[in-house]
Image (cartoon, rainbow, N blue to C red):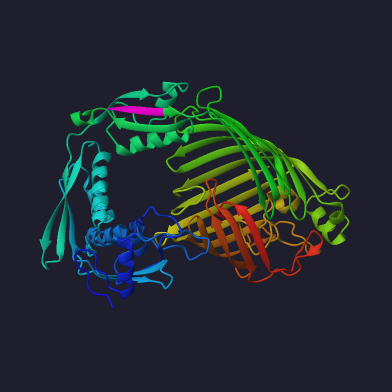
Amino acid sequence: MSRPACSGWLPVHPRGIVLLVLLLASPFTASAQDDDGIVVRRLTFIGIESINESRLRAVLATRQGSRLPWGQRHYFDRGRFEADLKRVVAFYADRGYPDARIAGFDVDLDEERNRVDLTVTVDEGEPVIVAAVLFSGFHVIPDARVARLARQAALEVGRPRDRQMVLATLEMAANELREHGYPYARVSTDEAAMAPARDVRVVFVAEPGPIAYFDAVEIVGNQSVSRRIIERQLTYRPGELYSRSAVQASQRRLYGMELFEFVNIEAIDPDEQSPRVRTRVTVAEGDHQRVNIGVGYGTEEKARVDGEYHHVNFFGGARSAGGHGRWSSLDRGVRFDFLQPYFFAPRLSFGVEGQQWYTDTPAYRSVITGGKITVMRRTGSTLAAASLVGEYTSSSISADALNDPALRDELIALGLDPTTGRQEGALNAVALDLQRSTADNILNARRGYQLALHLEQAGRILPGTFAYFLASADGRHYLPVSESVVVASRLQLGSIDAVADEPANVPFSRKYFLGGATSVRGWGRYEISPLSGSGLPIGGNTLLALSVELRAPLHGRLGGVLFLDGGNVWEDAWTLQLDNLLYATGAGLRYDTPVGPIRLDFGYQLNAEPGLVVGGEPRDRRWRLHFSIGQAF
């Protein structure tokens, strides 16, 4: 039976008394990581209702060990546990519970005297409630911005007075002043108790200081990159009103050039509070030549080898050029690219790409030779691009497929030569792309969204073998629902419409498929599409796919997911049959690495696709196992 804790060490369990005597007589401390230490098997809290328990555990030195036999062990230390009891009280006080206390604790040693269960009982007490949040001295910025600041303040009326939320709101308020030309602004807080006694009014008081404008720019640290290259990436100029976002955007643009390992932009002599702000841009150049070689294995592509070389200051001027080669059983080839980052204007860039790429699908193989030229404009997290595409595409089916009458007639109707089993021709097109991303991590996002829109027109105004119009959209959203759990979702839509309703006007390389490690995971790669008479996937002209994943950590770098995928591909353009979707559900494991998570997914078909044949064999198995690198989306 535990008793209320007082000052000092208070044992509350008979076996806890024995444990403490042993600890007092033993030199064991937190650094003792051997088999003689007492392992913390379980750390349990009772009475926690109003705060996030996982955040509380994260600040404590005492931690429970893994339940897995090979997991990490954590050892008990008396001094650290005493300090942790004080940390619990301080943690509550910072979150608006000044009367929180440790009501009791229990130290339970097992019979072998090498493992201990700890139980801590917390009395949270009554919180201090925020009755009002006010802003004083912000008349120097527009009223609409002050109102927006009040709406978006991290500190909320009616909630406990959380000191972290107070500091976040204070920083937000100061940054709002700095955004409107007041770089030396300071903001303080004033709290006044209100009736009832537990309520408090929090006032954020501004000291704007003098209004200021940008002045001369000093650049240090550059060696092979000229001053002119750095200056043209800055989004502010001398004489313009000071803006914090302009400084941040300039720093992001300099990092985005991939020329520098370190970039910092700061005011010179800010203590002078001069109305003319001189800034210093400090850079540290990195290696301009990058070589990456990767070897991997996936259940779909089998062995995979990738090699890449890039020079990020090609002939100076921050130009980038390089090549990428790949070989696997499903695709292989080489790609080359060149990028001119400054194309008549700071936000415009010009790129050239060329490739020869081989792709293997269940029904046919295609080789694309050609490239495109692109003009891009980037504004913050948004990228708009216009491209001119010129390719020669060659597709063919196997001899066995060509000799299959049920398949042969269909593919010939789609544009294959009846004697060679090939489709060849020139593809010339114009394309428009719009991309926007607020995701916090490209490899493993936890919050934000990504949106990509693509339009492509071949033929009509351009000469070539193929003529079609293609439109597609890909949206991804990442929502953290707790400190460690994320819900990720994805929606894909696409349709390709042949000019004059002639199927041969659409090349096989543009056809849609689903299934595999990144889409409907109960099926293998490219197994979802319209089927030939013999059951072989031949690709379609309309696509709809959706996925939802629940991602959560399991232990250390190991994480798990639960997912639901759905979608289908239809033969006709602009055709969506929502009552004809295929679904798969399953679970997976993720192991985080610097190049992205290693992924293992088990997908199970909720409704099978009858008659599917791949490689001459019926695919009636309703589950698939996928092993790859990187999140599914």
Q: Which quadrant is home to the C terminus? A: bottom right
Residue interval drawn in magenta: 277-283
Say if 222 sits above or below 575 in the image: above
Is 422 inside the magenta-drawn segment?
no
Among the 4 quarters of the image, the one containing residue 121:
bottom left
Q: Position of residue 135 (x, y in %)?
A: 18, 51
Observer-nearest residue: 196 or 81? 81
Is residue 79 shown left or right of residue 224? Answer: left
Q: Is residue 408 visible?
A: yes
Residue 17, compared with residue 78, is above or below; it is below
Q: How many marks?
A: 0
Instruction: Judge by depth and name the residue closer to the eye, 334 or 47.
Output: 47
The image shows residue 147 at horizontal and vertical percentages of 23, 52
Does the magenta run of residues contain 282?
yes
Residue 151 position, x and y percent, is 26, 56
Figure check: 141 above or below 572 = above
Q: Quadrant of residue 526?
A: bottom right
Dominant secondary structure, magenta? strand
Apparent side of residue 274 relative to residue 565 in the rendered image (left or right): left
Q: Nearer the viewer, residue 468 or 27?
A: 27
Q: Position of residue 108 (x, y in %)?
A: 36, 72
Q: Residue at x 50, y 55 (%)?
A: 557
